[in-house]
Amino acid sequence: MTSPYDRPDQQALEQLERVTALLEGQLASWRRRTIKAEHELEELKTRQATYATPEAAELRRQIHDLEGQNEALRQRITASRHQAEQLRSRLRFIEERTVGDAG
């Protein structure tokens, strides 16, 4: 038998689940991009040792760009983790209030 009582936090919980799923997808995507960029960086560093041509300057520029992108991605991941933790804290608070109000 289901209760006619609708949890007041149900909509917030559903929204939190959607946001969390989106965050997880973004984190996975950023991680894949970071790993790929790091792999490319290692390849470029290996090639840089063998090239003493104008290509070497371009490779150094690309390496610098990739390092900057990696750092930006790391910062975004850190910020996303912080946001996810804040959402978890809010959810715990809502659940505690709901349990307290129901009791």
Image (cartoon, rainbow, N blue to C red):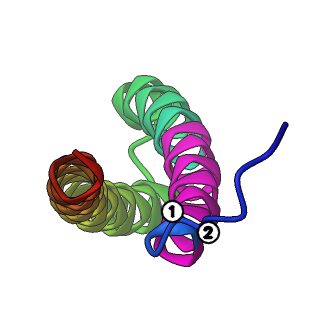
Q: Relative to 1, does residue 102 appear above or below in the rendering?
A: below
Observer-side mark, 2 or 1, equals: 2
- Residue in the foreground of this view, choosing between 8 and 29: 8
Q: Quadrant of residue 32?
A: top right
Expressed as whole percent of the image width and height from the top left, the position of residue 92 reads: 21, 47
Q: Amino acid at mark 2?
A: Asp
Element type at marker 1? helix
- Quadrant where the C terminus sits is top left
Task: Tell me, yes or no, whether the highlighted magenta stretch contains residue 31.
Answer: yes
* Residue picked out by circle 1: 13
* Residue picked out by circle 2: 6
Expressed as whole percent of the image width and height from the top left, the position of residue 60 reads: 32, 58
Q: Residue at x 34, y 60 (%)?
A: 73
Q: Quadrant of residue 54?
A: bottom left
Q: Which mark is residue 97?
A: none
Q: Residue at x 58, y 41 (%)?
A: 28
What secondary structure characterizes most of the magenta part?
helix
Q: Relative to 40, does residue 8 appear above or below in the rendering?
A: below
**Residue count near mark 2 (Cα–Cα under 10 Å), binned few <14, some 14–19, many ≥20:** few
Q: Which residues are magenta?
A: 11-32
**Distance in Å between CA atoms under marks 2 and 1:** 12 Å
Q: Residue at x 41, y 54 (%)?
A: 56
